Structure formats: structure tokens, C-alpha cells
Image (cartoon, rainbow, N blue to C red):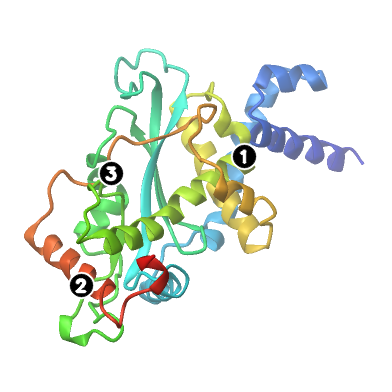
Amino acid sequence: DWLKCYLFFVFFFQYRFLATGDSFVSIAFSYRVGTSTVATIVDEVTKVIWDVLVNEYMPVPATQNWVEIAKEFQERWNFPNCIGAIDGKLVVLQAPPNSGSLYFNYKGTHSIVRLALVDAHYLFRVIDVGAFGRNSDGGVFSCSSLGKRLKEEKLGIPMDTPLPGAESLGPMPHVFVVDERQQLTTEKRVYNYRLSRARRVVENAFGILSNQWRVYRRVMAVTPEKAEAIVKTTCILHNFLRIHGNKCEEEHAVRSSPCDSQDSLQPVLRMGANSSSRLAVSFREKFCTYFSSPQGEVLATLH
């Protein structure tokens, strides 16, 4: 009947836009409908998908969820007490009108920033979208809702626990892994390898996302507000598809670079802080000691 036909075209327009990145004009011309009709459908369906799926497929992690994430990172990536990998990407847009340099980034394009926390299975657990593109540094995290809740101790992060088999090092905090951009040294070679291996999870998740939703392969010709909604929707659909077993493109996506020259997802200039606190340095040294000890070493790391 007409209702089924209407719903088919509504979701087909939405899928084609996200999966191909075709412009509203191109989609409208293909099906002989108005450009404004396509734009309205994409805008409304994007919001509905997020509202319907977010509570089930991207719920706010509770303490027990963090414990499970840490266990999975230890089992799959050999990094204990890790409750997520964090990274940010610039989502490139057409220059918004009357925005000045707010969205202008270090690559000479206009963008918004998407910050993501990913678990050991490439699921987006927390995302923060919409920061101005010019804020492409560690300040993005501190100003994000995730950073603020972490500072206010409202994330429900588990209590400090010793590393497996290394009780002598004392209780260690649960940590997020980020790109520290340090020069590799002989003394910290093992630590840097294990850190990079765990952090690569978030890069792989971005790669899977941009391979699945080709809207990221083009400059988004929408307002920053609509781009934010599009990013949130693709992330929730990513989780939906992975949970329900659609991993057919994972192997190719993980091997591919998520930020090639044709991708509108570009790396944020720097996600780590310019300097570390004494406490952070102390914990880093303990991780370094643990990874080189009999209790924490992975033999393949040393070859």
C-alpha cells in the first residue's frame, strides 16, 4: 500500500545519503522529488534513529560496564585496567555562513570535532560531537562532556586495583589510552608497543565507520548542527550492526587507513596533554615495569 511505499523511500533516501555521501540534489534528481524533500527526510530520520536506538545501543556505562570493558581489553589487547581508547577526528564541512574562523582547522578546511571512546570490540561507548574545528588539541577533551564528567568523578569508574600478578606495585587506576606522541626509546619500547596496540582500537573503529558510511568520504554540505546529528546516527548504527553480527567489512577496514586522502574524517592535531602530572608519570612507569615483568609480558612483544 502507499504507506509501505512511502516508508520504503523515506529510509532508502536516508540509507543512500549515509552509505554513498551523494548530495541531496543528486538523490532528488534520481527519484524525481524535490531537493528540500530529501533534505527534510534525511534530517528527520537521522534524529529519529538516534532517539530510538541510543538507550539500547549506546547507554551510559555504569561501574560494572567499565569492569567488563577492562576485562575485555586485558583478554584481547593485553592491556590491563584499560576502560577504553579515546581519539578525536575532524569531520570536514563546507564553510558555514557567517562563522568566521570558528570551524577553520589546522588543515585549512572547516570542520567539527568528534571525540569517541571505544571498547575492545570497536563499539562506540561514549561520543562527543560538535566542538569547533579550530579547537584541535587536548582542550577538546577537557571541554567535552566526557572530560567534564571525568573531572567531576561522575563516570562511575571502578576503584583502583592491582595489575594481574603484580600486587607489589600497589593499586593502579583504570585508564583511557590515548596517543601520547612520544619518541620511542629502548627502555619504553614494550610499553609504547602495548599502549599503541590498545589505542589502535579506536583508529580501527573509525576505519570501519568510514568504510561503511561513505558520507565520511566527502565534504558534508550541511550545517554544523545537522552534521552533528549525522555523526551521532552513523555511530549508533555502527554499534547496531556490530552487535547484530554485520562484520563483513571489518577485516578490510582494519587493514585500511581510516584517514586517507579521500576521507573527510581527519585526525585531530593532538589529543594528549603537552605535559604530564607527576602522578601520571608514576603510573606510566609502573605500567612500563609491569609490561616488562614475567607477570605482564607478552612474548611476541619482545621480537
Residue that appears at 15% across and 43% down? 274
Graded by Cα atoms within 10 Å as few (under 14), some (14 to 19) or many (20 or more), the crowding at tag 3 reads many
Using the image as rendered, state which of residue 19 and residue 226 is in the foreground: 19
Q: Which residue is drawn at 45% across and 48% down?
A: 203
The label nearer to you, 3 versus 1, is 3
Instruction: Calculate the distance from the C-alpha at mark 1 to the C-alpha at mark 2.
Output: 41 Å
Dot in front, 1 or 2:
2
Q: Which residue lies furthest to the left in this view?
A: 278
Is any atom of residue 50 visible in this view? no
Label 2 sits on residue = 289
How far from the left and from the top, in percent, is residue 104? 33, 21
- Neighbor class of circle 2 (other Cα within 10 Å; few <14, some 14-19, many 20+) is some
Amino acid type of the residue that numbered disc 3 sits on in the rendered structure? Met
Q: Residues within 10 Å of mark 1 (few under 14, many from 20)?
A: many
Determine which of the numbered discs, if any, sits on residue 271 in the image. Answer: 3
Residue 62 falls in image quadrant: bottom left
Which residue in the structure is indicated by mark 1? Answer: 213
Label 3 element class? loop
Relative to the observer, which residue lies in front, 113 or 257?
257
Quadrant of the snapshot with the N terminus:
top right
Give the left or right position of residue 139, taking residue 25 as reference: left
Mark sitting earlier along the chain (1/2): 1
Question: Residue type at mark 2?
Answer: Thr
Q: Which residue ends up furthest to the front in the rendered image?
A: 303
Image: 269 above or below 67: above
The tally of labels here is 3
Q: Vertical placement of 195 versus 228: above or below?
A: below
